[in-house]
Image (cartoon, coloured by chain):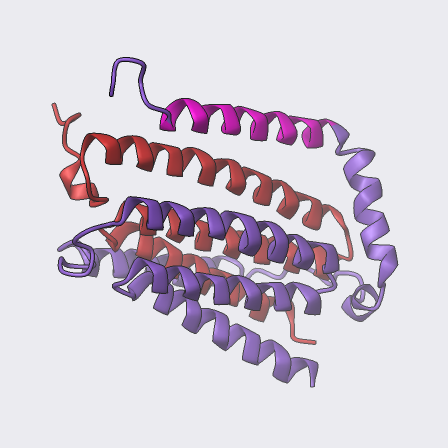
Chain colours: A purple, B red
Amino acid sequence: MVQAVFYYLAVASVMSALLAVTRRNPVHSMLWVLSLFLHVAGIFLLLGAEFLAAVQVIVYAGAILIFYLFVIMLLDVPDEERGDRFGGHWKFAAFAGLSFAALAGLAHQSPLGEGASPEAAAGAGEGAVAEIGRALFGPYALPFEIASLLLLAAIIGAIVLARKKAGES
Amino acid sequence: MVPLHVVLGLSFVLFGIGMFGFLARRNIILMLISIEVMLNAVNLSLAAFSWHLDDPRGQVMALFVIAVAAAEAAIGLGLVIALNRNKPGAAVADITELQG
């Protein structure tokens, strides 16, 4: 049962990703990326990462993607509908993507060893979230604070980049 | 549940699709979206390792990746808006001012 759900989510996310990078209309692309994010959130749930699934839906699908949609609608990208979707080098790009996936698949053939029993982790429930919280505010407190500083820098940078210069009308 | 290498294989395929999109698309916003697809593939492999090794640190790493992705989206779209003010349209082929 869990396997069937996983394979459904895997196939659906690969299809969504393929459609997202090939659709002509940017808004359609964005909606396929939304579908990809929701399916990947489902895979996170199967992997016992409930908190990550929630963050994926709230931050990725809810905030980042809506931000992209806003920008697309603000800019009103004019000739994307008419012009070519891909540059003339798209065959090389496809070759690069395929060979990356194949090489990565070959590279991890070396055995990774037996981990802890995965089924035990999947059923952990509330304990898993509490463990993440303890890790975030314990050994990872400094990276956590640096991440908030990075986000602050990104906010200020985005405002500086996007505002009108003083001289411009 | 499925073995680790199947989840990792899915992550590699998603990363390859994102890489193809980044290299092939002509629209700068869709190139940024392809980067998001690649970051999501990496998050998937981090979550898979976290599950396989029964260790929450992989999920903590994935959370940091999401924070960096949010920062990247803000800066990238700020750049897109600044570029769009100078030259309407979002095709990377038109942005040639820095060509030596």
State whether residue A135 is above or below residue A104. Answer: above
Q: Nearer the viewer, residue A102 or A7?
A: A7
Instruction: Give the image location of residue A99, x and y in percent.
Output: 34, 60
Q: How many marks?
A: 0
Instruction: Give the image location of residue A62, x and y in percent.
Output: 56, 54
Q: Nearer the viewer, residue B55 or A28?
A: A28
Quarter holding the C terminus of chain A is: top left
Q: Residue furthest top?
A: A167
State which quadrant residue B49 falls in.
bottom right
Q: Nearer the viewer, residue B13 or B36?
A: B36
Image check: B60 left or right of A161? right
Image check: A48 left or right of A109? right
Q: Nearer the viewer, residue A163 or B55?
A: A163
Q: Is residue A28 magenta?
A: no
Q: Residue at x 69, y 69 (%)?
A: A46
Q: Residue at x 70, y 32 (%)?
A: A144
Instruction: Give the image location of residue B5, x and y in percent.
Output: 58, 67
Image check: A151 left or right of B36? right
Instruction: Give the image location of residue B59, x and y in percent.
Output: 69, 50
Q: Which residues are magenta?
A: A142-162
Quarter holding the N terminus of chain A is: bottom right
Q: Residue at x 38, y 53 (%)?
A: B34
Q: Residue furthest front?
A: A169
Q: Is residue A156 magenta?
A: yes
State whether residue B76 is above or below residue B43. Answer: above
Q: Residue at x 80, y 41 (%)?
A: A135
Question: Main structural element of the magenta stretch: helix, strand or loop?
Answer: helix
